[in-house]
C-alpha cells in the first residue's frame, strides 16, 4: 500500500528535549543553592527515565512519578524537603524546562517536504495531553502537525504496539500506510513495526543500533529516504 501518513515522535525528534532538560537544570539548580554539574545532569536524566517507565506501565500517576524523581534526587544534592513541598519544588524546574523548549532546525523543512509530497502528519508521544500540546504551541507548531496522540489520551504508552494501532485507528489510516519516525529505537521503531507500520529510526546522536537499515541522522534525509522506498 502507498504511504499516506507520517507519525512523528515529539521529544528529541521535533523538539530538543535533551537540550531543554540541560538548560532547565542549569537555570533551576542554582535557585536551590546547588551548583550544576555533568554528573547531576546525568543523575536527573537517569531518574527521569527510571520513573517514567513506571508511568508508562501505568503503575503510578504522572504527578507521582515527578515526586519520586525528587525523592531520589534531592537527597543527592543535600536539599532538605517536606513531602508537602515536592510539587512546588518541581514547579520550579518545570518553569525553567518550559522556557527551554527549542525546535530542531530540520523540522520546518521536513514538514514542508512532506506536505509537498502529499503526506499527512500526526504526532504520537509518550506524555500527557496538556504538557505535550503546550510544547507544540511554544515552538510554533500548533496547527502544522495534524492530530496529536498522547499516552494519556490513548490509555497506553509506547512501547506497547497498541499505542500505534490506536493512533492509526483514530487517525483513520491503516498501519501499513503509515511511517513512524522517532529517536528511540525501542519506543518508536520496534513496536511500530510490531503494529504493522513502517518505521525509520532518527538517530540524531549516532548512538545506534548501527545495524538498523532504516536509519537517518537528520530529518533532512527523511524525504529522500521515503522517495527511495521505506
Image (cartoon, grey):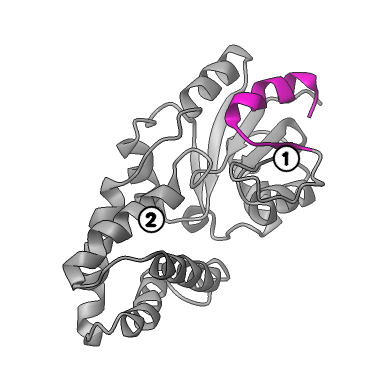
Q: Name the side, left or right, on which 21 lies relative to 217.
A: left
| Residue nearer the viewer, 76 or 81 | 76
Residue 192: give x, y in percent of width and height. Answer: 71, 47
Q: In which image quadrant can residue 70 be found? A: bottom left
Element type where label 2 sits in the image: helix
Give the Cα separation between the discs numbered 2 and 1: 27 Å
Nearest-to-viewer mark from 2 and 1:
2
Horizontal relation, residue 133 to residue 165: left or right = left
Q: Residues within 10 Å of mark 1 (few under 14, many from 20)?
A: many
Residue 142: horizontal and vertical position, in percent? 37, 31
Say which of 227 and 63 sits in front. Answer: 227
Query: Taking 133 as reference, is 176 above or below it?
Result: above
- Where does residue 52 sit, x and y in percent of width and height? 50, 68
Q: Which residue is mark 2?
A: 21
Residue 223 magenta? yes
Quadrant in which the N terminus is drawn: top right
Picture coordinates of residue 112 (x, y %)?
Answer: 52, 17
Q: Residue at x 55, y 45 (%)?
A: 124
Read off the residue under disc 1: 199
What span is in magenta? 214-230
Q: Earlier in the sequence, mark 2 or mark 1?
A: 2
Amino acid at each position: 500500500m502507498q504511504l499516506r501518513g507520517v507519525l512523528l515522535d515529539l521529544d528529541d525528534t521535533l523538539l530538543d528535549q535533551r537540550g531543554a532538560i540541560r538548560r532547565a537544570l542549569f537555570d533551576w539548580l542554582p535557585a536551590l543553592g546547588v551548583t550544576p554539574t555533568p554528573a547531576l545532569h546525568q543523575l536527573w536524566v537517569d531518574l527521569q527515565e527510571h520513573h517514567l517507565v513506571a508511568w508508562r506501565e501505568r503503575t503510578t500517576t504522572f504527578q507521582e512519578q515527578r515526586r519520586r524523581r525528587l525523592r531520589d534526587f534531592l537527597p543527592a544534592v543535600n536539599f532538605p524537603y517536606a513531602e508537602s513541598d515536592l510539587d512546588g519544588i518541581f514547579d520550579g524546574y518545570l518553569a525553567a524546562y518550559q522556557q527551554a523548549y527549542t525546535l530542531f532546525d530540520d523540522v520546518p523543512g521536513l514538514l514542508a517536504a512532506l506536505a509537498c509530497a502529499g503526506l499527512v502528519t500526526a504526532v504520537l508521544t509518550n506524555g500527557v495531553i496538556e504538557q505535550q500540546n503546550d510544547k507544540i504551541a511554544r515552538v510554533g507548531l500548533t496547527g502544522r502537525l495534524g492530530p496529536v496522540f498522547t499516552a494519556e489520551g490513548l490509555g497506553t504508552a509506547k512501547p506497547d504496539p497498541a499505542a500505534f494501532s490506536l493512533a492509526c485507528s483514530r487517525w483513520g489510516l491503516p498501519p501499513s500506510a503509515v511511517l513512524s519516525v522517532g529517536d528511540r529505537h525501542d519506543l518508536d521503531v520496534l513496536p511500530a513495526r510490531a503494529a504493522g507500520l513502517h518505521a525509520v529510526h532518527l538517530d540524531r546522536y549516532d548512538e545506534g543500533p548501527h545495524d538498523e537499515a532504516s536509519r537517518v541522522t537528520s530529518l533532512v534525509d527523511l524525504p529522500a529516504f521515503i522517495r527511495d522506498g521505506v
